């Protein structure tokens, strides 16, 4: 049954692969600078790598927003997000997977009465404005740099063509990696608390954690989406906002990649913290939003004459409609799944409490995670408040002990993704 | 990836070789006209043969470049422009060959007092052709320089027109037979055409250059 529930996540992954790979390789394939098969193979490989290696950080943030703790709930949330994307795409409104999934999670929170962490939500919503803006700024800066260098380097057109192809492949690979790292949370994040996978140890050399296996599955769905449907998207990749040449496409994808990397890299976050600098939140940002922002930036720096502002308005309206529609659809769908199909869309609070009363066997590692989970367990009536502010310091820690010792990654994460208390 | 760079490098060399042939064609033409006016027929004929060979090589090289650009899908966004430029510059080379061939076949008798003006026409026409090749080379490497070369071509084309007009006025104002006058006009007109063709290439080049700015 659990495999059936995972299908909605796989569907979401497929649609992300079909839609967002075109953001990374669209112009390269559309302008025949890179062959589709090569682009699809590179994109798939690096999406999988990004998702498995670096998908955890962003997933944790999404988990803070709403811990969808029952598999039927996860199924409904992913399905509602997927249907929202399908509907918006059919209506020819550019849509962001991140917004659909965030809206769907908020819909789940509303339906189940779980608190929505407004801090995390505002952080995520802020990135919807910041990421296209940042992408536009990066695109402008990179454009000016390219213009300066190419104006002086006097590179032969054919050699520049070879460099551009190489650049499109390298940047496309990086873009795919960051797409996997940043967007796997959108595809599989809601299934993490209910993940059916256990750690796999390979010759005592390498451990593939349960969450990583889940991400691998989601990334494979993305890869299938890339191979089966993204060709059409890539070949018809529109130059509607602003017409791009291969060099401009390289600049746009580079700006997009930097933005996604900033919001996905756990390594960068740790580095900034270790340097005493303010860290960048690990938040799932929309690949489409970053691309639109970067193209807009290029259009502006080139005089804004060729920019289709009408289409930009339509895209912006889609960004507002997507999370609202996804939240509403999730709310209605959850009602049906719970009352018509009689599926558990949220763990009962009693079950949650049972899981929190635990053993003195909790190891040191779990004890560290305690402050995160404790308030959620003890403050069921306090839905709207900041849950962490009243954390009792010495509550026993929790559910991850069943996996303790063999899944440290999930341990840390699941401590943030515990069942939310329901009235 | 290194294979891709190697293939591009080969095509880059071939384009440069093709443009070298166009330049060479202009120089041979200029020298051959001088030999003709000096009555050195053997040297003239030898230059004509050399020009015909150069033109054939140019045609062959152009075809190779065209097929490489298409088969290897090189410079997909500028391919049409580049092929158009190479074809038009090949037409300029053909025009020089055809004009010189007419000298060999029709053997026009040019009055000695008109030789300097006639040489001016051919020199300006060849200068326009050389400017055109420089502009095309700049299109591949240094876009900012294209405009300068194009302006030079326009200048030489005007000068060629002026000199041709001067030549025609002198011919028709003289005592020659009408058939002789018409015959000489025809030659001045064909040399002018070399400069006109070069100007057409530069017009095309100006648009292609705008498209290449990032």
Image: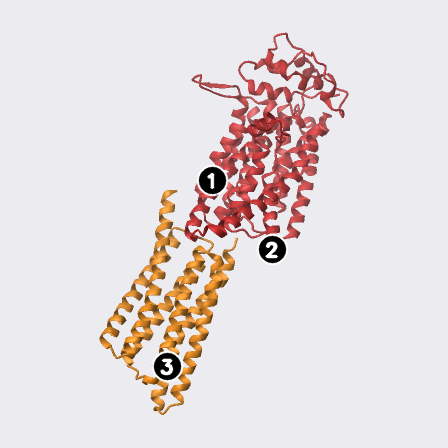
Shown in orange, the chain is B
Please identify the quadrant where the N terminus of chain A is shown.
top right
Q: Count of labels shown?
A: 3
- In-image side of A233 versus B99 (left or right): right
Q: Residue B136 at x, y = what percent?
A: 42, 61
Residue sitting nearer the eye, A335 or A406: A406
Q: Residue at x 49, y 46 (%)?
A: A28
**CB under 8 Å between discs 2 and 1:** no
Q: Chain of mark 2?
A: A
Res A170 label: 1
B157 lies left or right of B93:
right
Q: Residue at x 50, y 52 (%)?
A: A151
Q: Which chain is red?
A: A
Give neighbour class at mark 1: few <14, some 14-19, many 20+ (Cα, 10 Å): some
Mark 3 falls on what kind of element? Answer: helix
Crowding around mark 2 (Cα neighbors within 10 Å: few <14, some 14 to 19, many 20+) is some
Residue A253 position, x and y percent, is 54, 43
| Residue A1 visible in the displayed image | no
| Of labels 2 and 3, the one closer to you | 3
Check residue B186 in the rendering and tell me which mark sits there, or answer none: 3
Between the C-alphas of marks 3 and 1, the distance is: 59 Å
Q: Secondary structure at mark 1?
A: helix
User: Residue drawn 44% across and 77% down?
Assistant: B161
| Label 2 in the same subunit as label 3 | no
Image quadrant where one finds the C terminus of chain A: top right
Residues at marks 2 and 3, CA–CA distance in whole angstroms: 49 Å
Closest to the observer, B140 or B119? B119
Pointer 2 residue: A306
| Same-chain check, marks 2 and 1 | yes
Q: Chain of mark 1?
A: A
Label 3 CA crowd tier, 10 Å (few <14, some 14–19, many 20+): some
């Amino acid at each position: 049954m659990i495999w059936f529930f995972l299908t909605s996540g796989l569907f979401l992954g497929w649609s992300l692969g079909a839609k967002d790979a075109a953001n990374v390789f669209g112009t390269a394939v559309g302008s025949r600078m890179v062959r589709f098969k090569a682009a699809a193979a590179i994109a798939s490989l690096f999406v999988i790598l990004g998702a498995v290696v670096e998908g955890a950080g962003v997933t944790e943030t999404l988990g803070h927003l709403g811990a969808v703790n029952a598999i039927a709930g996860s199924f409904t949330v992913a399905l509602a997000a997927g249907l929202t994307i399908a509907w918006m795409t059919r209506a020819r409104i550019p849509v962001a997977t991140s917004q659909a999934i965030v809206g769907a999670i908020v819909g789940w929170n509303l339906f189940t009465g779980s608190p929505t962490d407004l801090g995390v939500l505002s952080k995520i919503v802020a990135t919807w404005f910041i990421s296209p803006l940042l992408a536009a700024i990066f695109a402008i800066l990179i454009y000016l740099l390219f213009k300066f260098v190419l104006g002086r380097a006097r590179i032969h057109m054919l050699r520049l063509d070879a460099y551009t192809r190489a650049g499109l492949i390298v940047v496309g690979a990086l873009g795919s990696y960051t797409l996997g790292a940043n967007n796997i949370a959108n595809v599989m994040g809601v299934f993490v608390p209910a993940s059916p996978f256990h750690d796999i140890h390979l010759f005592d050399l390498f451990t593939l954690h349960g969450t990583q296996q889940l991400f691998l599955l989601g990334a494979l769905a993305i890869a299938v989406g890339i191979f089966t449907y993204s060709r059409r998207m890539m070949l018809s990749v529109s130059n509607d906002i602003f017409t791009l040449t291969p060099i401009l496409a390289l600049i746009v994808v580079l700006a997009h990649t930097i933005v996604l990397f900033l919001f996905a890299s756990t390594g960068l976050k740790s580095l900034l913290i270790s340097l005493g600098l303010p860290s960048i939140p690990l938040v799932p940002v929309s690949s489409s939003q970053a691309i639109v922002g970067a193209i807009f930036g290029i259009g502006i720096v080139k005089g804004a004459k060729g920019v289709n502002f009408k289409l930009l308005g339509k895209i912006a309206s889609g960004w507002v409609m997507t999370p609202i529609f996804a939240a509403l659809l999730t709310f209605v769908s959850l009602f049906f799944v719970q009352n018509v199909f009689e599926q558990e869309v949220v763990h009962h609070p009693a079950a949650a409490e049972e899981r929190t009363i635990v053993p003195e066997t909790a190891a040191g590692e779990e004890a560290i995670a305690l402050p995160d989970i404790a308030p959620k367990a003890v403050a069921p009536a306090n839905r709207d408040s900041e849950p962490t502010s009243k954390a009792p310091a010495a509550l026993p820690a929790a559910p991850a002990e069943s996996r303790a010792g063999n899944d440290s990654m999930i341990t840390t994460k699941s401590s943030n993704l515990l069942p939310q208390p329901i009235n | 990836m290194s294979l891709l760079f190697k293939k591009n490098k080969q095509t880059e060399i071939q384009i440069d070789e093709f443009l070298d042939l166009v330049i060479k064609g202009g120089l041979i033409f200029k020298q051959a006209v001088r030999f003709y006016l000096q009555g050195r027929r053997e040297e003239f004929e030898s230059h004509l043969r050399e020009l015909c060979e150069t033109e054939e090589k140019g045609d062959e090289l152009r075809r190779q470049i065209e097929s490489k650009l298409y088969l290897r899908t090189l410079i997909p966004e500028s391919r049409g422009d580049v092929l158009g430029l190479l074809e038009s510059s090949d037409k300029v080379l053909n025009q020089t060959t055809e004009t010189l061939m007419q000298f060999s076949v029709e053997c026009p008798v040019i009055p000695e007092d008109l030789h300097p003006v006639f040489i001016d026409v051919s020199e300006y026409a060849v200068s326009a052709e050389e400017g055109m090749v420089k502009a095309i080379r700049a299109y591949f490497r240094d876009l900012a320089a294209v405009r300068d070369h194009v302006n030079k071509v326009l200048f030489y084309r005007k000068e060629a027109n002026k000199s041709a007009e001067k030549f025609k006025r002198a011919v028709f104002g003289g005592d020659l037979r009408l058939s002789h006058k018409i015959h000489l006009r025809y030659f001045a007109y064909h040399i002018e055409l070399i400069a006109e063709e070069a100007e057409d290439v530069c017009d095309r080049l100006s648009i292609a250059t705008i498209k290449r700015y990032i």
